[in-house]
Every structure is written in C-alpha cells, then in structure tokens.
Image (tube, helix red, strand yellow):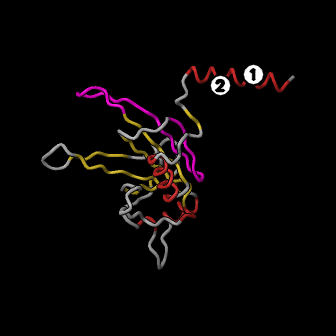
Amino acid sequence: MAVIKRLRETKGGTRGTLSMSVRIWLNTAGVRAMETPQQGRANLLKVGESSLRVDTENGRKYITLNGDPNDPSTVFTNVPRRFIRQVTFMDNFYKGFRTDGLYRHKGATARVETRESGGNMGAVQHQNISISAGSIRTLREIYSKVRAGELLKPNIDWAISETDLTQREAEKIATEATTKH
C-alpha cells in the first residue's frame, strides 16, 4: 500500500495512539539528492528520521514521514517541491460519511470507499480515504474539503443505484434518439 498506518497500544490500557505516515514519492532528482552527499547542506537522507525506501511492487523510491498531515501542529521535513513526484496518504473514519467515489481538487485525487469490518462486537461500518497529490499542501486541502463536505459530489460516483443507472441509460438513449432525428 501507498501509506502505512499503525495503531500502538499505550502502556497499561487498551487506548491506542494513532500514528500515520505520508509517503513522499521522489522523482529522479529527489532520489539523486537522497543518495548523494551534499557539501555545506544537509543531505535529504539525514533530515529527520526519513530514509530512502523502494516499493517492492513498482520499484519506485520514496521516503516516509510520520505524523498526521491534517494536524496543523505536525511539522514535516521540508522536501523541496522539485524533488516530489507525488504524495500519498490513507485514513479511515467512522462518522461523517461521504458518497463513495473519486473526488478531484487541484490535481489531487481522493478515493472514498465504505467498508464493513467485523470483530467481537459485530460489524462496524467505516470509510477508507486514500489520497494522491502533488504536494502535502494539496493533500491537506483535498482531505479537509472531502471531510467537511465542501466537495459535495465525487467526480466519479460509485454510489449510483441500479435504478438510477437504468434511468440514466434510458435518458441517454432518448437524448441520442432525439438528436439523430
């Protein structure tokens, strides 16, 4: 997966602390900057706890930054925009659901999908959101807009019922028949 999300138990209880990660996928110049020692400046490799990793599925290189990108108190390593190919992030939420589908904003894409997970207490419905953006700023913007309901409808709506689809198909056929005559 493009993003790692961990739940760590706190000492002496079942309450958890959420630790989120953002993956910064690097372009060729970013990879070179990570791998090349730089005189007089900190090498990107040495900034924070980030280290260059390789995705086993696609072979692309990235660094992982820990923290919630939507928390204004979270400070991320300042990776120059010219080194970034894309930024990815995933989250789950259990209320404030949005319509399933793909949302787009300023070149970023957010995928929202409703899921059900089972456990000892029965099935619990939640939504997954995964985001791909060109910068952390754009990632924050699309996440906030989707969660706040400011992007009212997805660009691609997966929540269309079969009757809605049948009605749309009938309207399209009627429109096409009208325009041909």
Query: Which numbered circle lies on residue 168?
Result: 2
Q: Residue furthest bottom?
A: 40
Query: Residue 142 at what x, y percent from top left?
Result: 51, 51
Q: Residue furthest left?
A: 12
Q: Residue at x 52, y 30 (%)?
A: 159
Residue range in magenta is 100-125
Q: Please identify the quadrant where the C terminus is shown.
A: top right
Secondary structure at numbered mark 1: helix
Q: Residue at x 39, y 52 (%)?
A: 21
| Mark 1 residue crowding within 10 angstroms, few (<14) / some (14–19) / many (20+) | few
What residue is shown with label 1? Answer: 174
Query: Residue 151 at what x, y percent from top left?
Result: 53, 46
Query: Which numbered circle lies on residue 141?
Result: none
Q: Is residue 134 above or below residue 9?
A: below
| Principal secondary structure, stretch drawn in magenta | strand
**Does residue 89 appear left or right of residue 122 in this picture?**
right
Amino acid type for the residue under numbered disc 1: Ala
**Does residue 10 appear left or right of residue 167 in this picture?**
left
Query: Residue 104 at what x, y percent from top left?
Result: 57, 46
Q: Residue at x 46, y 45 (%)?
A: 2
Report the front residue among 177 and 64.
177
| In magenta stretch: residue 25 | no
Amino acid type for the residue under numbered disc 2: Arg
Q: Is residue 7 above or below residue 137?
A: above
Q: Is residue 52 above or below residue 149?
A: below
Report the front residue among 64 and 42.
64
Query: Residue 68 at what x, y percent from top left?
Result: 37, 54
